[in-house]
Amino acid sequence: MTTFALVGAGPGLGLATARRFGAAGHTVALIARDAGKLDGLTADLARDGIQARGYPADVLDIESLTAALYAAAADLGPVEILQYSPVPQAHFMKPVLDTGADDLDAPLAFSVKGPAAAVNVVLPGMRELGRGTLLFVNGSSAVRPNPKVAGTSIAFAAESAYARMLHDTLGPENIHAAQLIIPGAIRPDGGPSSPDVLAERLYDMHTTRDGFCHYAEPLPD
């Protein structure tokens, strides 16, 4: 049995994707800062017959993030699918002219150092399996810079570049890296940006392995 590891577990998209990959037979490792929230999510999944465990960690604390992923693989089985989708923090959202050099430290750690650390933990296990999937979830500022949210625009663009290099480099090893862009808010209305629909989309990206960048909905004009 292999593991679906979710960095940025929460009650919306995170729970929906955990449920979808768990229903497909994967054990589920949930990683987020709030241990109490993780307990609630694992209980929800257990009611659906899905084996899941929570691992408290902060993506801005590389040591805690890597320790969580190592523990998950040891407890649940090798990580075949990694989803990196934590929600950016509010203070990343300053306008560009209010953003100084120091203001970029946390967004870049969140969106570049965190993914790089996570990938480097799970990659050896994927290579042993002979397969793997790396899923990155971002907002529209990853592909269309928004001067109102400079921190995420810069950091998401860097994350996109990193993920694209992984896609190009690891494809020959049967390790697929892909990005899902969600242009607006996640909405619990059954539409294309609702949690269940997005979870199905991410599962399809894992199974079909078709291309790098995918859009939940077209970017607005």
Image (cartoon, rainbow, N blue to C red):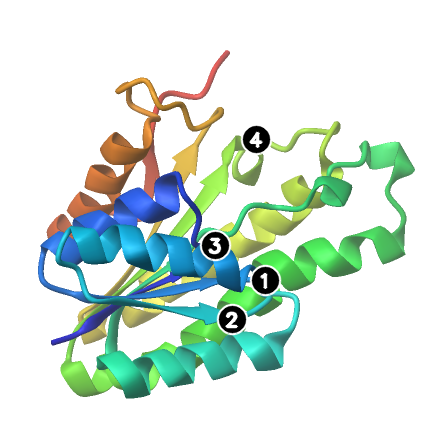
N-terminal-most mark, 1 or 4: 1
Mark 2 lies on a secondary structure that is helix
Mark 4 lies on a secondary structure that is loop
Q: Do the residues labelled 1 and 2 touch (CB within 8 Å)?
A: yes
Q: In this view, does 118 lie to the left or right of 77?
A: right
CA separation, marks 1 and 4? 18 Å
Mark 3 lies on a secondary structure that is helix
Three-letter amino acid code at the position of disc 3: Lys
Quadrant including the N terminus:
bottom left
The residue to which callout 2 is attached is: 116
- Whether residue 210 appears in this view of the structure is no
The residue to which callout 4 is attached is: 144
Residue drawn at x 78%, y 54% is 104
Quarter location, residue 150: top right
Name the disc covering residue 37, or none.
3
N-terminal-most mark, 1 or 3: 3
CA separation, marks 2 and 4? 22 Å
N-terminal-most mark, 3 or 2: 3
CA separation, marks 3 and 4? 32 Å
CA separation, marks 3 and 2? 25 Å
Name the disc covering residue 112, or none.
1
Nearer the observer, disc 3 or disc 2?
3
Horizontal and vertical percent position of residue 160:
49, 51
Quarter location, residue 174: bottom left
N-terminal-most mark, 3 or 4: 3
